[in-house]
Amino acid sequence: MRAMTYSRYGDNSVLEMTDLPRPKVGPGQVLIRIRRSSVNPVDWKVMSGGLDAMMDAHFPVVPGWDVAGVVEEVGPDTPEFSPGQRVAAYARKMVVSGGTFAEYVTVPAEFAALIPEAVTDDVAGALPLTGLTARRSLDALAPTADDTVLIHAASGGVGYLACQLAVATGARVLGTASEANFPKLEALGVVPVRYGEELLERVRELAPDGVQAVADFSGAEGVLETTLAVLRDGGRHVSIADPAVEDHGGRWLWVRPDGDGLADLLARVERAELTLDIDRVLPLAEVAEGFRLSQSGEARGKIVIDVER
């Protein structure tokens, strides 16, 4: 099968198109013929060696953890799925190796979710990591209609979805972003707040009594200090970017593969309750360009990889 791989840690220059054997499919597993994947910052951070202290890598590594495609084969005792069904999954495994920038990937059945007919491959392939991260964050914060929620990096891939999930709870949502992204947030019912200098003062002006919940999808310098300054006593806060939150009563979150959670998100997309921003779709051979766009911040939405091209 065609696969984009790297045989050592490094920058985008280590990526190369390779021909690899098709993955085997074992008990309780699903072999997916991949139609779409998408780029996430973790992909190039892992490639640089950023998770080497946490996860072993088996070279050559196929990067990529998002997948939308068609069930090619199921392993023994896998009654949940049948060949020919469209499925999506967050395909992270315990070892960095067989990812989704390839023609096939095998995942445990509990990672996968059926894609509703009305949801496109592009959207399904862009949703798993960012969507499940946003969902896990909101589950941890458990906002109610009586709460004010502050979301740092609200216009980013995870933040944009988290804003929609938070608004759906009835909570008042404040979201930090650049002024260029204010209309995007306002269309969701979010109160935008310009990040940068004097962010604390701007949040206090909008929420003089503080906020009940904060989600940090930025990890930028000063974000934790702002969070702690505006969080009410007994408030909840989470971060996907700064483990130091755990020293201050917060929770450092890592997304988990979750087929049931992904099915819920896909159903919300089908009902037009959740939308994604897709910046562009690139062929498999241009994964390095996708990484560059992600690294530079040029992309204004998800970068989808069309594995069939």
Image (tube, grey):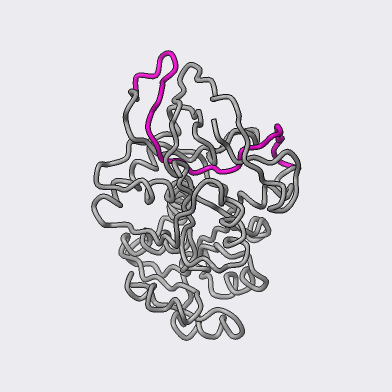
Rendered position, 83 above or below 55:
above
Front residue of this view, candidates 41 and 195: 41
Q: Residue at x 66, y 37 (%)?
A: 61
User: Is residue 171 left or right of 244 when viewed as pictured?
Assistant: left
Residue 42: % across, % down: 61, 51
For image coordinates 58% across by 24% down, the residue present is 21
| Residue 300, above or below 267 | below
Name the quarter where the C terminus is drawn: top left
Left or right of 295: which side holds 180?
left
Instruction: Give the x, y percent position of residue 103.
Output: 50, 34
* Quarter of the image that includes the N terminus: top right
Answer yes or no: is residue 250 visible.
yes
Residue 163, magenta (yes or no):
no
Quadrant of residue 206 in the image? bottom left
Residue extending furthest toward the top: 76
* The magenta stretch spans residue 68: yes
- Image vertical order of residue 303 relative to residue 79, above or below: below
User: Residue 200, image x and y in percent?
Assistant: 57, 81
Residue 133 showing in the rendered view = no
Bounds of the magenta span?
A: 53-80
* Camera-side residue of 245 and 69: 69
| Residue visible at 32% across and 60% down in the picture | 169
Query: Which is more toward the observer, 187 or 136?
Result: 187
Q: Quadrant of residue 7?
A: top right
Measured as percent of width and height from the top left, residue 284 is found at 52, 46
